Image (spheres, helix red, strand yellow):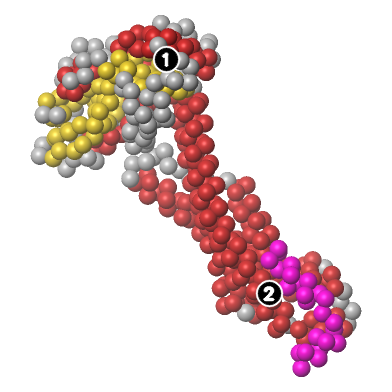
Amino acid sequence: MILDYFKLAFRSLKGRSVRTWLTMIGIFIGITAVVSLISLGQGMQTSINYEFEKIGKNRIMIMPGSGQFGPSGGSMFTGKMTEDDLNVVRKIKGVDIATATISKDGRVKFKDKTEFMSIWGYDTDQDAEALTERTSFLDIEEGRQLKKGDKYKAVIGYNVAYDKFEKDVSIGDKLLIEDIEFKVVGIQKKAGTGVHDSLVRIPIEQAREIYDEPEEISTIFALTELTEEPSEVAENINKGLRRHRDVKEGEEDFTVQTAEQMIAQLNTILGVVTIFVVGIAAISLIVGGIGIMNTMYTTVLERTKEIGIMKSIGARNSSVLLIFLFESGILGLAGGVVGVLLGLGIAKIGELIAQKLGADIFHASFSPLLIIGALAFAYLVGTLSGILPARQASKMNPVDALRAAK
């Protein structure tokens, strides 16, 4: 019986193919948007979590300012930290390694071209060396890392070496950073994060010289001992720095954040963006549902005679109701199939474009659950949109239907 209902529905939709395609537009536009955006959002979330897992969850960042971290490494509110703060962090129970950086935007000239990019003044002591070895974002592809005793040497990101200038930068080449000459000793592997691929690392002493910052530091990176809980160590750092800086709890002029907190923060942002965009896409689905309802009302009017004949030979109200519900459901499902295919295609194209632009962390995730869910939702929208027209058809009096169709 169910198969017969599907056959009747397909035959009806096939007989008016142009109207069927026009009716499905709203559905497949909405499903396309939902599938493509959720695929990209889930893919990015998975990639970000994977990268953080790779570098370890025992990582803590301490920055001046009481705001959240910004895209360029700064916080929303300015503040200052010095070497004294670094020494305090190093003495905190549970901290294994702690090192500091100075990060500034600066002019970098190679040959005849000048670019503005992020300059990291990086410590070259034993702690910094150990932390660098455990940070996959800073792995070397060619040359070497900065080492103790280096002066006017630089390690550059992958994009700096191969994309920023007209000619590729090689090991041994000279860069002018704020008009001071540095020799390139290392080129980092492609990290795919944008930030790490586009930075220049130099010894912190030369960064202090260039930017006239004898004591100030931008960020303290710390690793906890493996036996310690990062959140507990972070709280110890908070307490230690509050005492050192003479500030009360809740009035901190610094921010301490663990890797797990950063992951949670990024996942929350991605989740909110996804929900917002899917909400906008849902408007298209509502429009598509209204379109299906309108089409089904028209179909009921066109098939008044057919309804009258079916009911006059014994068709029950429930049978007529199901025939029209299956038809509206198939309209939604067909729009869902087209939308899923387009959505997956757009997500893949978005991934390829992003990776072409250097964001290797940008991936699309094609979850079977997402595909099945999108198709089921499209079918549900179609079915719900057809309830009122189907009910109208099922309630028709056969005599009135045959009379009206003459």
**Left or right of 21 in this view: 302:** right
Q: Pointer 1: what residue?
A: 247
Q: Which residues are magenta?
A: 383-406
Magenta stretch: residue 390 in it? yes
Classed neighbour count for the residue bearing mark 1: other residues with Cα under 10 Å, few (<14), some (14–19), many (≥20):
some
Single out the residue that lies furthest toward the bottom: 406
Q: Secondary structure at mark 2?
A: helix
Q: Residue at x 63, y 59 (%)?
A: 378
Q: Residue at x 31, y 34 (%)?
A: 197
Q: Pointer 2: what residue?
A: 296
Q: x, y percentage for residue 353? A: 37, 49
In which quarter of the view is residue 91 placed? top left
**Left or right of 172 in this view: 364:** right
Q: x, y percentage for residue 125? A: 29, 11
Would residue 105 be seen by someone viewing this image from the given angle?
yes
Q: Secondary structure at mark 1?
A: loop
